[in-house]
Image (cartoon, helix red, strand yellow):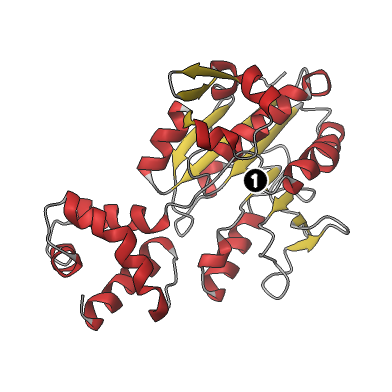
Amino acid sequence: MIASQFEYLKQHLKSQSGLVLSNEKQYLVESRLLPVARRHGFAGLSELVQAMQRPGATQIASDVVEAMTTNESFFFRDNTPFKHFRETMLPAMLKARADRRTIRIWCAAASTGQEPYSLAICLKEEAQKVGGFRVEILGTDLSNEVLDKARNGIYSQFEVQRGLPIQMLLKYFTQKGDLWQVNPEIRSMVQWRKLNLLENFSTLGTFDILFCRNVLIYFDQPTKVDVLQRMARQMPSDGYLVLGAAETVVGLTDAFRPVPDHRGLYQTATAGQSAAGQSPFRARVAG
């Protein structure tokens, strides 16, 4: 693959997904895109890039973006955000939403689904407190492949061993040969939708809690600012935003403020949309 082709790939990925690649990342591009090239019958990446530039190569271009933006995930990843969810966010929302008894949660860039399912399991574990509330969880990603896996909720032994306590595995999963599937009661608590964060997401409605972890690190600064500002407009004045451990809003936007002594946790600093915003989709009561 010549330099001009690599430059074309960088520009394509930036415009379609926000992913910013340095020249030092060419090895990563080759490792992820060679399987895509072979799947489409090309000898190498040069032929793949040439095909992408032809009219009507929508599927190839989409496959390239999916291959480069598919990130690993695992259950209760880093644990701290889920501790904050159980001990800080959920109690605050149960109190603040006592009148309308609805809480909406969005997991942006949800990948293969472990994060939304981890939140659903947390809600089941807190069923006595959450009873009577309708808790809606939406998981979004721009990759059809990972969304299909998330909807099915089927994971390998290796995947369920990463972060998932054995008692929760036995309680909320069913073994199917060498694989494990999330039980229907947990799967029904999460809805899935294909979504690119670079595009308009205002039609999703208002969210009380928004998980957007390990996404901003792939964006350049103007893209980070744009995404954060638009997310703030989707949240009420007491909404919570959860970012990855290596991410921050500091220096990017004043729309969120850090929650003291809670790493990676932020609250909206100014009023967003009405906290009583209507949900565009229906979900199962968590309790």
Which residue shows up at 25% across the image and 59% down it? 34
Q: Position of residue 14 (x, y in %)?
A: 39, 69
For residue 262, above or below residue 117? below
Which residue shows up at 57% across the image and 66% down it? 217
Which residue shows up at 55% across the image and 48% down it? 108
Q: Which residue is mark 1?
A: 77
On-image quarter of the C terminus: top right
Q: Position of residue 224 (x, y in %)?
A: 57, 68
Q: Position of residue 159 (x, y in %)?
A: 52, 37
On-image quarter of the N terminus: bottom left
How many marks are shown on the rendered structure?
1
Q: Nearer the viewer, residue 256 or 189?
A: 189
User: Tag 1's secondary structure?
Assistant: loop
Q: Nearer the viewer, residue 3 or 60?
A: 3
Q: Is residue 279 visible?
A: no
Which residue shows up at 46% across the image and 46% down it? 141
Q: Position of residue 24 (x, y in %)?
A: 41, 79
Q: Quadrant of residue 250?
A: bottom right
Left or right relative to 116: residue 254: right
Left or right relative to 265: residue 184: left
For residue 208, above or below residue 124? below
For residue 166, above or below residue 88? above
Q: Amino acid at mark 1?
A: Arg
